[in-house]
Amino acid sequence: MEFGICHLNCIAIRKEPSDQSEMVSQLLFGEVFQVIFENSDWLKIHMDYDFYEGWVLKKQVYPLDKDRFKRISESEKHFSNEMATYINDQKDQLQILTLGAVLPEFESGQFVMNEQKLEFEGEVIHGRKPKSSLVLTAYKFLNSPFLWGGRTPLGVDCSGFTQMVYRINGYQLFRDAHQQASQGEVLSFIEECEPGDLAFFDNEEGEIIHCGILLANNYIIHCHGKVRIDRIDSSGIYNVDTKRHTHKLRVMKQIF
């Protein structure tokens, strides 16, 4: 297999080719990839969207030929804008899709998966949206539980959250927080920031370990235990429940 597509709602991308290996990210429905290495059960993949690499189970993906991979890769992306919805698969069985699922070659309420046309009746979002739309999408993830490597409302990590909010609205972010911190333009003061801008936080060694999306009036939405809203000041994030600072502010960025 040279190229492939995910035809399940989400599957684990693991650090090593083992079910016991750490999940470093997830491959979502409709996302395509290139195969770097293949053994009897596992594929090492290079994701088309954010260039992330890792291992997925071969039985959880579907092969694509080069022409269709290129067509999907270069086409405008349409996403499910529903928290959770269902489609009927080729065997007329229900399959769940969550927020941010990609609908390949979507047109007139239909998309193509595994060489068959399927109907989608949910809300679809596509194209580059204004910054205000980022905040609306971020609120949809509110109270989603933290899951290391997660990228869906059923479980998400801090950078998976920011990446998906931006992606659904037509903007590209890398996968990990330290990678995202290399993008965009630096904002010097909180007063310069607008809702939808990003904030990044570091540890004592100066490594970027956390990120979140800025809201109006010195609030931030971020994933810490769950996707939650806290206060932010020049020192960092102030947890409204524990009444203490939890993350040290490193830099704020405007991606637009």
Image (cartoon, rainbow, N blue to C red):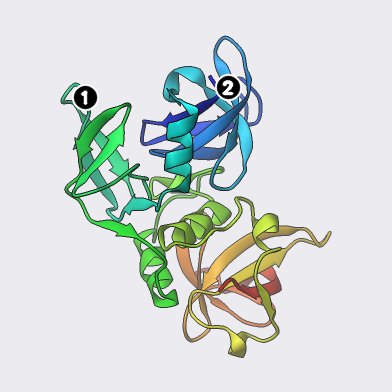
State the image quarter where residue 238 is shown. Answer: bottom right
Where 67 sits versus 80, above or below? above
Spatial CA distance of label 2 from label 1 is 24 Å
Q: Nearer the viewer, residue 53 or 234?
A: 53
Q: Residue at x 39, y 61 (%)?
A: 142
Q: Residue at x 84, y 59 (%)?
A: 205
**Residue 134 place in picture, x, y as percent:** 42, 69
101 relative to 233 in the view: left or right: left
Which is nearer the N-term, disc 2 or disc 1? 2
Q: Residue at x 42, y 66 (%)?
A: 128
Mark 2 neighbour density, 10 Å: few (under 14) some (14–19) many (20 or more): many
Who's the residue at 72% across and 60% down the image? 208
Q: Position of residue 129 (x, y in %)?
A: 39, 70
* Of 25 and 61, the residue lying toward us: 61
- Which residue does the numbered mark 2 point to in the structure image? 43
Q: In which image quadrant can residue 139 be found?
A: bottom left
Q: Is residue 31 visible?
A: no
SS of the residue at dot 1? Answer: loop
Q: Amino acid at mark 1?
A: Gln
